[in-house]
Amino acid sequence: MSLWVDKYRPTSLGKLDYHQEQASQLKNLVQCGDFPHLLVYGPSGAGKKTRIMCLLRELYGAGVEKLRIEHQTIVAPSKKKIEINTIASNYHLEVNPSDAGYQDRVVIQELIKTMAQSQQIQASTQREFKVVLLTEVDRLTKDAQHALRRTMEKYMATCRLVLCSTSTSKVIGPIRSRCLAVRVPLPSTEEVCNVLTSVCKKEGLLLPPELAKRISDKSGRNLRKALLMCEACRVQQYPFSADQDVTEPDWEVFLRETANYIVSQQTPQRLLEVRGRLYELLTHCIPADIIMKGLVRELLNNCDGHLKPEVAHMAAYYEHRLQLGNKAIYHLEAFTAKFMAVYKKFMEDGLDGMMF
Amino acid sequence: MLSFLTNCSVDQSFIDLTGQNLFDCREKRGQILGSQIEPMRPRKRKGEICSSDLGHRKQDEPWVDRYTPCSKVDLAVHKKKVEEVENWLKVHTDGSQGGLLLLTGPSGCGKTATIQVLSLELGLRIQEWTNPPKLDSYTNSQQVSFDIFMSVKSKFHLTSQSAQFQEFLLRANKYNCLKMVGDARSFFPMSIQVFDKYTVFSCLGCAHSCCAVSSRCFVKTSRFPLVFIVSNSPSADSSSRFLFPRELMEELHISNISFNPVAPTTMMKVLTRILTNEDGKSNGRVIVPDQTVLEMVCSGSSGDIRSAINNLQFASQKEALRGNHPLKSKVMAVSRSTLRKKSKPKNGQEGQPPVGMKDTCLFLFRALGKILHCKKAECAFALQLPSHLSQHHRESLQVDPEWVIEHSYVSGEFFNLYLHQNYLDFFSEMEDVEKASEYMSDADLLTSDWMSSNTMREYASSVATRGLLHSNSQQIAVGFRPLHKPNWLLVSKKHRENCLAAQFLFRHFCMTPVSLQTELLPYLAKFTNPFKNQAEITFIQDVGHLPLKRFSLRYSSYSIPFIACLRCTR
Amino acid sequence: MYVCVCIKKKKSSSHPSGGVHPSFSSGPLPEARKLEGSLPNLLFYGPPGTGKTSTILAAARELYGPELYKQRVLELNASDERGIQVIREKVKNFAQLTVAGTRSDGKPCPPFKIIILDEADSMTAPAQAALRRTMEKESRSTRFCLICNYISRIIEPLTSRCSKFRFNPLADQVQEKRLLEICEKEKLKYTIESILALVRVSEGDLRKAITFLQSAARLNVNNEITELAVIEIAGVVPTKMINDLLQVCLKGSFEKQEFAVMSMVNEGYAATQILSQLHDCIIEQDLSDEHKSVITEKMAVVDKCLSDGADEYLQLLSLCSAIVPQAPQNN
């Protein structure tokens, strides 16, 4: 039994639930025969990958859905072996180059080279090129991006790149200018509701519109998350009731509790406890920047309006350091300590104000 | 260094080959000991007196080698321990049943020496295997020792370590079978020596698997005892547990005998004996150090007899007579260079660097204490700050932070981690903590760029320590506080491992790591989906769930309306 | 390929008729061409897409004709290996060849070769230094043409050896005219607004404008190319959204800013794009210089953080809450 997210993923451009105009444009692109490099960008859960897979299917037919997971070993010039997982069909190759860390340049060049040199198996597909799909391009090193721009031109004849990224901010200009950029915004709340309802219908379930609305609100328009939430609700209770709890991931609840910890008391001892909780989150595979963002969100909800701009500045400041630094805990903790100090001062001032 | 020392495994010619390839001192000893035991590498010898043979030794030979024990009496190990090992050996060398023995203990406490002496006395033969310290360093240094064993077959056959070990076992077993015809009582205790924790880490993976696999087959096929020698350094005491988990110990009936550090009295005895010996025949080339020096050497080595003898030899060199207090300073120098010792800090003077005499671990905590307790001197001529900066006034420091870091023998980053782990206990004001944490964050930022991190490291630790000292404005007398090891290393390691495991186990979902870890996994934990395999289930149970304690929301829910009403009343 | 073809098609195959800077085509180069023998070393600089490369290529083609072109012109750009080693060997060897002053068909042609170093500002300083000697020694038979975006990244000794030409961004009318020509030739359906939008988003970069036009044409095969389509392809945030965001920043509460920033990020717009457009808006906004400078300073910080990989949402939120105190009603 597969997850709803996978089970009801649309497989052709015509069946997409939203951004249909864009879908028809992509269809045009495929039909006009000459296919450029693509840069697909948009927030997580907007359906970038779904669109790309639909596009590939449009290009090559159902053959692209026969996926195999391969484990490749690439030898860097420094004789270091880099292991990387790829997902491939006969027509395309998907790879997440950020798996390779700072050796990503070598990985990309090697993979594209081998891909471009191998001939298309079936001439009948009438596409003389194969597609290499690179995910998380925004996490590529600058070095790799510069190398990519040369590679893109060199193998244009036999290979097209589809780059997938959450934002174009971290993609260098030359690459952006070589690609056709396709923006995939998150679906609107209504669109999320519609998808949820139709999925539930296909499952033979009845989803109350109120619940659908609440789920889509809570998911922050992230469709993947919304579907997972919906399925979790189904596991939790069926038939659905309109006011049932929407299941949130443990770590979000945990973060909220942590934020409450911080707000309720501001002492070094409390900071020590918070540190323990941050460690707990880290060991449960939550990346440090996500922790930071989540914590900021919860703290913003918890503090007085007059503090909020300051908290926003602090958050931006320390999140930036987090990205630069080596050891995330220093910066997470410094942010927490800063918040505690500011909050404590604010509370004390408030008390003083009441005295007079 | 990978050394296969196989003396008598095949035949006599093989022995000669071995002897020639090794250092000449070995050759010598080989003759002395009647070619019965191939000695270990000289550095690793337990220094004991081998009184009868002293005259033949070269003068420049290290004392450690010169005084290798060759009888039970010479051993600096406690009698009962020796007996224990001897009994085990006797029981397991009947020829009927092989067995596995695990000897553990700190380095230099006489584990290897005991085995050698005993096997010599019992007329047994030894084959030794020593782990290469690093897996990937196939450098020249190994070739010498490497082809001793492999010369018979392929010389530079760079097989994996576990394969090498297995082949070694097989060979040892086979050759001995041949030998059995002539000599019914030959056997080989074999030793894995794990010298320090680096070795443990680097060889852990394969040593572990090879121990498990090879020893299993060894137990089944062999009738000869196999002895593993594992020295556990105080900081990595779990090495033997890593290598030999309890299940394996039970499954294979491995006996474990653990050695204690050599007792000071025994050590004193040995050292004195060596000195009298040397004095007798050295014709004045050796200066006999006085009793205090002996005591210092003794206490400085913390039960490591090997380093004690090394230090002693160094301290008694004639050339040492240079400064005013040559012996003392030399001992200092020696012991500083061999960092492993620990002792009670007898001489607590600040100026003198008695540092090396102590175990790094202990000293690290003292160094931390110096920073965290933040001792400030009441200095009379303190610089007066202008009034607008008066809040930054601090008493001058008693210790120099850079000095402390330099003498803690850990890298600045590591020191910072320790500080970070412990500083909160010493702060009482949130404002101070805020500043201190910012300094820590600054320090991390300084070393973030790998290009410059080498130069910046010192500055980073300086920023962190001085920042901490400065920001702690209201020093409270905290008294004793336990200090802890930093959790961060463990946490980040676990984070990495878990992320990799998640990506590996759930790669068929074809998701980006971030969305996999933050979206899919937490929900998978909530589903009753049957997973494909056990690994996924355990992983999800382990990582997907967080220990949610329902925290009372009382504080937070009240605090906001409270503030709101404050604003109204004003 | 198509991009190249399309652009190349539109660009000159021979120099004076090409899509080159009009001020330039009547400027110094034709004269230099007349002088032929005494063409100096050239340094072209200016923003991307202003026709620097096209100009020199067209000129070279004019000078040598198609046959000699291959032998006489060496073109190296940033994608080629251009370390000091290459300068020493490849460039030097090419420069040392001697050439005749006539074409194969007997027509006269300049007795020198041209080495075009495109994107010269990405060459390392040692490589540039190595070039210095070569340039002087081979001046009899070789002319260099350096092309770069930022003249400040070319070392002083090199700039002093070249005659410098600055390429200004193309005037809007010129771009518009070129785009309209292309549309006619390719028989595209377009609105005049979309062409204006193209000119606007490309910021004087004609190559960018043509690329966008081509992408738009591909995506809307049988439909009209609308302004919206152009804006979408360029990844530009619609002006209305930016204005709304600015209004929220100036007047709204923190919660509203939070929401506005969140929805911007959810729409998938790049933070750097939002930042640069917001910057343009702020400059035109009716604020005192003092306030503007405070805001733009914060923008600089945010831009740096973004380029370091900081989170877009947090940075934008911080920026927005920094604008609030500068708003007119708060002072």
Image: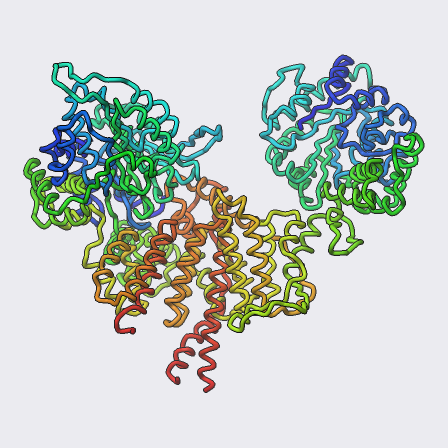
Confirm whether residue A57 shows in the render.
Answer: no
Classify the position of the C terminus of chain B by image quarter: bottom left
Work out which residue is located at the far top of the displayed protein and give it.
B13
- Dividing the picture into quarters, in which one does residue A316 lie? bottom left
Q: In terms of depth relative to the viewer, which is nearer, B85 or B7? A: B7
How many numbered discs, if any? 0
Left or right? Give the position of A253 relative to C14: right
Classify the position of the N terminus of chain B by image quarter: top right
Work out which residue is located at the far bottom of the displayed protein and give it.
A356
Left or right? Give the position of B559 relative to B403: left
> Residue C317: x percent and y percent?
33, 61
Which residue is pictured at 28% across the width and 38% down the height? A162
Q: From what the image shows, is residue C100 above or below residue B307?
A: above
> Residue C174: x percent and y percent?
11, 43
Q: From what the image shows, is residue A256 above or below residue B95?
A: below
> Residue C195: x percent and y percent?
11, 46
Which residue is pictured at 45% across the width and 60% down the height? A255
> Residue A204: x percent and y percent?
28, 52
- Dividing the picture into quarters, in which one does residue A55 lie? top left
Please say which color scheme the image uses.
rainbow
Confirm whether residue B188 shows in the render.
Answer: yes
Q: From what the image shows, is residue B536 above or below residue B480?
A: above
Left or right? Give the position of C18 relative to B479: left
Which residue is pictured at 38% across the width and 29% down the height? C84
